[in-house]
Image (cartoon, rainbow, N blue to C red):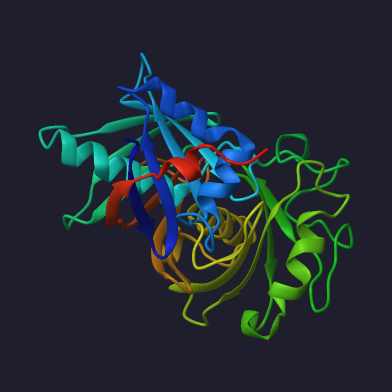
Amino acid sequence: SIPFRKMYGLGNDFIVLDARKDPKLSAAGEPKRATLLTDRKIGIGCDQLIILEKCEDANCFMRIINADGSEVGACGNATRCVGGLCFEEEPSLTVVNIRTKAGLLKCYKGDAPDMIAVDMGAPRLVWSEVPVAREVDTLHCRDAVEGPGLTDCACCSMGNPHATFFVPDCEAIDLPTIGHDLEHHAFFPERCNVSVVTVAADKKSIRMRVWERGTGMTLACGTGACATLTNAVRRGLIGADQGYKAEVKMDGGSLWIQYAPPGSGVADEGHVLMTGSYATAFAGEIPPQLWTPPN
């Protein structure tokens, strides 16, 4: 049998396979198998497939496979789910270390049993680290990439590339129609996650809608929320008066994000801190026909 858990953070859902004790489960990451498992009509269905592997310097190594079979370096909502799972396995832990392709992430227990806080590390702000196709000030990309009602995005990497478009009303943007072309724009050599966002007048919250690279429209994106708050702070839309933090409101729910820039004198300056909920929907076993996809 091949056991799995179906977990989610704010509606961003995952199939979680534990290959720490059974390394053969890592084979789930093969593109044909992954796309079959993640298919919502003929598979189990999810936004991303998560594979946990043994790691010498962390509680686990987390692999992240998109619905199109591509492997990526970071996923904030999945990190909270895996952190919560590790705390459930070992309740005495005070911190869970998760190694990813993008680096080491630290998870902490939140104020409620279903809340997890994650130190997502420092955002990458240099154009070549995002990456984008040419040297630009990533805070104002001007007309480098545009869409209907969209221009002058801010870009950064949270272990995966993000473009943030600040608009007066993000609900008015037809992101499901234009998201694919923005993701695949030549300005983004590794493709890109695209968020359209509106900062509330009181600056306490940000409304965000997201198109995720390799998946499409999703209910929430943890690294996208981190990138959105980071870029809002960089542009001076959120600042010291707000404690360099805000509630990022997505279709699936809210995350609380903080990014105090280097030199601000705030604890954890230079790092992005993300807090939000996680949950297990159900557990089951993968049937043989999904593990052995047709040629």
Give above or below for 175 relative to 158. below
Residue 166's spot in the image, x, y percent? 67, 70
Q: Quadrant of residue 196?
A: bottom right
Left or right side of 7 for 92: left
Residue 102's spot in the image, x, y percent? 55, 31
Give above or below for 52 relative to 221. above
Residue 181's spot in the image, x, y percent? 82, 62
Please name the residue shown 53% across and 37% down the image.
292
> Of residues 171 and 16, which is closer to you in this image?
16
Q: Is residue 86 visible?
A: yes
Q: Farthest residue toward the top?
A: 56
Q: Quadrant of the N terminus?
A: top left
Q: Is residue 266 visible?
A: no
Residue 153's spot in the image, x, y percent? 75, 61
Left or right side of 110 for 130: right
Q: Quadrant of the C terminus?
A: top right
Left or right side of 141 for 155: left
> Of residues 267 and 170, which is closer to you in this image?
170
Please name the residue shown 49% across and 64% down the image.
220
Please name the residue shown 33% across and 24% down the image.
20
